[in-house]
Amino acid sequence: ILMKAMIFAAGLGTRLKPLTDTLPKALVPLAGKTLLQWQIEKLKAAGIRDIVVNIHHFPDMIINYLKDNDNFGCNIQVSDERDMLLETGGGLRKAEEKFRSLGVQEFRSSNEGILICNVDILSNIDIPTLLQAYNPDEMGVVVVSERETQRYLLFNDENRLCGWTNIATGEVRGPIANTQYPISDTTKLAFSGMQVLSPRIFDCMDEVVKLKGEKFSLIDLYLSIAQKEILRAYIPENYRMMDVGKINQLSEAESFASSL
């Protein structure tokens, strides 16, 4: 299966201030490379060279950086959100035209998949193994782990997404919220900011846009389609990940990156 990728690089990086007062989060340096370079090189090593990068915060710095580095030998399109930050779901929706310009006009009906990752999450995930778990007849696979958090995706005994919960507030969303199915019978897993989706996902966005407007998260999208479409959990083996989110974690993130 051919694969395209999207790197979410538009965030404000507020937790990385004061670095992000003068830099976009994507260009924060880590062990001799930027966060963006780490992601691009990992995709490239897995054979994925058609990549969309979305931008918002210091957008021209990212555009110039990619140009100065000849797109790291990849075919990179920039999806520009400088007018409005659209969150992950809205960002993906806006990027559709960029996927088309990467060479697939009939993109929604193509057999290609889209690997989507966050620029600030580093991990040791083996991308080729993840891609093998993607079934183009379903809507996609979501990379999750058993780490402890407050917000979890809920999966049924067929490993299929059926809801979301915040254990601190008791809030439950998604198809399971409208059933008698006990949450205790689901598997709670933490989202890790990576997924492989069918391009048919673009057909499913109108409903969410009606409810939320153009700005919505991928989780909003997943919960709105989980009743009809199959999204499965994927737990990588021996998974190690790190969210390079906070300024005081940078030295820890340096050694983590160097160990990958």
Image: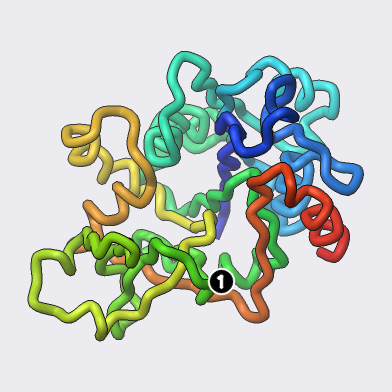
**x then y, percent, for residue 71:** 77, 31
The residue at the point 38 percent across, 66 percent down is: 152
Q: Quadrant of the N terminus?
A: bottom right
Q: Nearer the viewer, residue 219 or 49?
A: 219
Where is 204 relative to 182, above or below?
above
Using the rendered view, name the quadrant where residue 68 is placed.
top right
Instruction: Give the camera-side residue of 202 and 145.
Output: 145
Identify the residue shown where x is 49% and y is 52%.
112
Evaluate whether residue 229 shows in this view. no
Instruction: Give the residue at mark 1.
Output: 132
Percent position (x, y) of residue 42?
74, 54
Horizontal relation, residue 100 to residue 257: left or right: left
Relative placement, left or right, of 209 versus 188 is left
Element type at mark 1: helix
Residue 58's x, y, as percent? Answer: 65, 18
Q: Is residue 117 left or right of residue 151?
A: right
